DNA sequence: TCCAATAAGTTTGATGCCTGAACTTATCGC
DNA sequence: GCGATAAGTTCAGGCATCAAACTTATTGGA
């Protein structure tokens, strides 16, 4: 009861920072008395802070602005990339307070060695004088979310690593550790910090291709958390052989490696330069990738009935050239396009989407269900 | 609070019929006192009934068996097929109490005429002396679930029909009307009456191909309720032209019409006879369909991380011949197959799956949140 | 300058639902 | 028939919410 209402009230404050108690009561349907008492508890626990009195253009007492406390528990995000480690500290509102990026050839290191580095990074972050409420870890691989352990990360060459367990042991910090797939966390970052609504597919292409499916303002993870594996969706069953053993996988036909290869360039930066100068080979390579992306995404949209496709990672940078051919393919193949044409937008978050998503996930866990946290602080 | 606990208690009784109050208390974590009081209310409202005293193999008072009341509110399901109308009356447990099937060329009739027939059928069903708690309607088309109106049903030739509104007006009965897509409701029937767990894709092929996605024991409907449209998933972008304007759609390559055509038979019954006798052309036609189904379903499974595929409708009858090639394709293309191989099973419900699903949906709405109903009855 | 009007926020008593413990009822085995 | 055991009920106590009265803060007009 109180648990539910605490979440309700805190959500209202997070959604509309600066609201007064009375405004929150009106919005949640609770009484002023109830809101007052819940807010007081949350102020006591350091989740909510009072601001200045609000302006008012008429008679009556002015309300005290409420907002998420900038000194409340922070979320620490960690991303284990193929050739870097990144961390990111965010406050309750999701604002980035500190970040850290370091090259690290994780492909060549054992999981134990890498996780030791991660633990060191966590301990460093803890030395900042902000309280840590949770740690989120992003990995490029299949994560069994409930257990927080990694099943396989092809591009890291890792298999069966109990990330949550290892990290909890090594970092000597009594906070929850959440582990998630990089693409899924990037999608959540887009949901929380980008400018798209509550339902979309976020597709990001770096070395692999991953999708994050957001439905009703929440991540769709599937039964074990393996959802969103779009990279090996078969878009051309008679197409070229893929490393995974199947044929015509999306990753093989529209992945960064294939685009770069087909365009005959050395990397994404050169590709962008060529595209800007109107190079025909480069344009054709990107248009082809767009077509295959369209085939895969139209399938996802038909199946899931989502109104928006967000291009993340490298695709966000290629968006001007992907947009039109992708749209054409979607309009042709999506059955419900007539009623709700699919929107295609580029992500506004850069390469940090995944870390930010990881960090924000950690604080969101508290915001989504504040009562246990409040109790633990006030106890 | 009570609302939540009422649902909890009723769910426990529905899950394990014949439990005593004490057993329900143990299972839900509530106290015997709370359960007693909630159960008494629900008995008063006619949702729950007491049975005989339970057997016991030791000392102590025997518990009174509790089960969903067979005289409680019933659900009435209606299916508007292409060439028939079907209705089905189920009690709270989902057991079919009456059914009715009548040929009706709905393709040739106006929606108004068909809905008038449906309303008549509903009024007939009401004359049975059981209370009706809700009506569910299954239609082969895109349904905007929230509004209960049909956007388009290609095989009926209907467009923009406000089924809920029309029916509510015509049937003169003050109960909620739920409208849903046939394939989705068939999937729910499978969930509730079949023998599969809480997560699966149900794929049914009659004239069109539709999928119902069940996740965490609930239907995945998408934003507007258009989810599960798998028929026009592109499985072979360079394949034959489909009526929808796209190329190589699943429906075009693995639909009933295509199988029948490729096998050179007159219909499904002849096809089954040929298959049983080992006819080579028929076998090849079915294997080819299985392959394309495998391409489409592997995509769905990768995206959604579902452990089971249920074959419904015509595919259920073809299951012995579909099974092996479908499995081969799934094992090859599903990324997480190594950890959780995809199960393929045939639906045990026949052609009535959709009506039953529609009827059961209507009563499930009460079971999922009994308190408002209880209050309305006791008031 | 003061006061009525208005609105924010707090206090207080009542209500509703759940809980724990004691109590009643029913059954088994000796 | 009696003690042990378990189901189900009764009742006092607690906790969170609510409605309403009350206090505090602010505006604008007399």
Image (spheres, coloured by chain):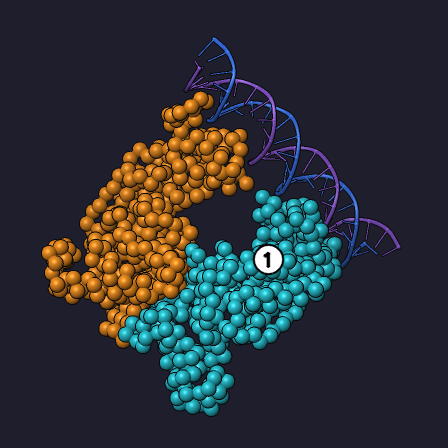
Chain colours: A cyan, B orange, C purple, D blue
Q: Quadrant of residue A80?
A: bottom right
Mark 1 closeness class: few <14, some 14–19, many ≥20 residues within 10 Å: few
Residue A310 shows in this picture: no
Q: Secondary structure at mark 1?
A: helix
Q: Is residue A358 left or right of residue C7?
A: left
Q: Looking at the picture, tell me which residue is in the foreground, A312 or B324.
A: B324
Q: Position of residue B97 (x, y in %)?
A: 28, 37
How many numbered marks have been drawn onto this rendered protein structure?
1
Residue at the image position 39 percent from the left and 84 percent from the top: A262
Q: Is residue D17 left or right of residue B98?
A: right
Q: Position of residue A59 (x, y in %)?
A: 74, 56
Q: Chain of mark 1?
A: A
In this picture, is B149 found above or below B99? below
Residue A206 shows in this picture: yes
Q: Position of residue A267 (x, y in %)?
A: 47, 84
In this picture, is B312 found above or below B128? below
- The N terminus of chain A, quarter of image: top right
In this picture, is A167 found above or below B7? below
Residue at the image position 31 percent from the left and 77 percent from the top: A240
Q: Which residue is mark 1?
A: A169
Q: Quadrant of residue B47?
A: top left
Q: Position of residue A63 (x, y in %)?
A: 71, 56
In this picture, is A144 found above or below A345? above
Residue at the image position 35 percent from the left and 45 percent from the top: B192
Q: Looking at the picture, tell me which residue is in the foreground, B287 or A96.
A: B287
Q: Looking at the picture, tell me which residue is in the foreground, B364 or C28.
A: C28
Q: Quadrant of residue A297?
A: bottom left
């Amino acid at each position: 009861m109180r648990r539910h209402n605490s979440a309700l009230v805190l959500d209202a404050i997070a959604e509309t920072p600066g609201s007064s108690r009375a405004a929150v009561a009106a919005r949640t349907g609770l009484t002023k008395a109830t809101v007052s008492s819940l807010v007081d508890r949350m102020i006591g626990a350091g989740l909510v802070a009072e601001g200045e009195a609000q302006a008012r253009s008429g008679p009556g007492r002015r309300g005290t602005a409420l907002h998420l406390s900038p000194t409340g528990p922070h979320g620490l995000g960690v991303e284990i990339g193929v050739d870097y480690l990144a961390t990111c500290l965010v406050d309750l509102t999701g604002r980035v307070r500190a970040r850290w990026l370091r090259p690290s050839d994780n492909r060549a290191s054992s999981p134990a060695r890498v996780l030791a580095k991660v633990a060191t990074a966590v301990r460093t972050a803890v030395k900042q004088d902000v309280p840590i409420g949770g740690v989120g870890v992003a990995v490029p691989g299949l994560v069994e979310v409930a257990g927080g352990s990694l099943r396989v990360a092809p591009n890291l060459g890792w298999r069966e690593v109990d990330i949550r367990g290892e990290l909890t042991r090594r970092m000597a910090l009594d906070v929850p550790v959440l582990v998630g797939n990089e693409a899924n966390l990037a999608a959540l970052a887009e949901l929380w910090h980008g400018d798209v609504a509550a339902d979309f597919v976020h597709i990001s292409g770096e070395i692999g291709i991953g999708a994050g499916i957001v439905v009703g303002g929440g991540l769709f993870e599937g039964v074990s958390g393996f959802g969103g594996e779009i990279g090996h969706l078969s878009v051309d069953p008679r197409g070229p052989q893929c490393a995974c053993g199947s044929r015509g996988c999306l990753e093989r036909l529209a992945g960064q490696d294939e685009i770069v290869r087909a365009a005959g360039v050395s990397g994404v930066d050169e590709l962008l330069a060529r595209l800007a100068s109107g190079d025909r080979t480069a344009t054709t390579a990107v248009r082809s990738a767009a077509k295959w992306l369209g085939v895969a995404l139209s399938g996802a949209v038909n199946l899931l009935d989502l109104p928006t496709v967000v291009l993340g990672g490298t695709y966000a940078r290629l968006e001007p050239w992907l947009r039109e051919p992708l749209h054409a393919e979607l309009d042709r193949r999506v059955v419900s396009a007539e009623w709700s044409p699919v929107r295609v937008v580029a992500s506004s978050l850069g390469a940090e989407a995944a870390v930010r998503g990881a960090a924000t996930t950690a604080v969101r866990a508290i915001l989504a269900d504040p009562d246990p946290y409040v109790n633990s602080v006030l106890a």
